């Protein structure tokens, strides 16, 4: 039973990781800013939040392995920080740039 839940969580995480790429490709094909904003608000941002929650759970489960290796900060940034930045710190409809300085998402200044 636990293995099924774990496999289901992995499939969901993979789907969430692909959502921003799909939305970016869909937006570049249509070029319609209003459509990009609607897809971002209704689909991509909620999925980004769910991805951050799943990343938080994974981070807590990985702590016994990351503490001895000294990679706690890197893991937290990759699994929690980047999804939260992508969800809350970019203009609506812009799938490439985050923050006030418009740096590429996932690359903190």
Image (spheres, helix red, strand yellow):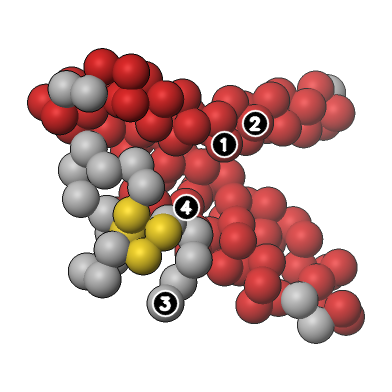
Q: Is residue 87 above or below residue 68?
A: above
Left or right for 14, reference 2: left
Find numbered disc 3 in the image and state the secondary structure of the residue it sits on.
loop
Percent coordinates x, y for residue 99 in the rendering: 28, 65
Which of the marked residues, 4 or 2, is nearer the chain's N terminus? 2
Mark 1 or 3: in front is 3
Indicate the quadrant containing the N terminus: top left, top right, bottom left or bottom right: top right
How far is mark 1 from mark 2, CA to CA? 5 Å
Write down the residue under mark 2. Answer: 14
Mark 2 or 3: in front is 3
User: Are the residues flagged by discs 1 and 2 in contact, CB closer than 8 Å?
Assistant: yes
How far is mark 4 from mark 2, CA to CA? 13 Å
Q: Is residue 59 above or below residue 68?
A: above
How far is mark 1 from mark 4, CA to CA? 9 Å
Which of the marked residues, 2 or 3, is nearer the chain's N terminus? 2
Left or right for 58, reference 68: left
Write down the residue under mark 1. Answer: 17
Q: Is residue 43 visible?
A: no
How far is mark 2 from mark 3, CA to CA? 26 Å
């Amino acid at each position: 039973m636990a293995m099924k839940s774990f496999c289901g969580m992995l499939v969901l995480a993979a789907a969430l990781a692909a959502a921003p790429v799909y939305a970016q490709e869909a937006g570049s094909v249509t070029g319609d800013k209003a459509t990009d904003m609607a897809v971002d608000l209704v689909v991509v941002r909620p999925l980004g939040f769910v991805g951050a929650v799943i990343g938080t759970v994974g981070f807590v489960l990985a702590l016994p392995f990351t503490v001895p290796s000294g990679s706690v900060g890197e893991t937290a940034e990759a699994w929690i920080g980047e999804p939260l930045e992508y969800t809350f710190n970019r203009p609506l409809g812009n799938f490439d740039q985050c923050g006030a300085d418009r740096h590429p998402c996932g690359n903190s200044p």
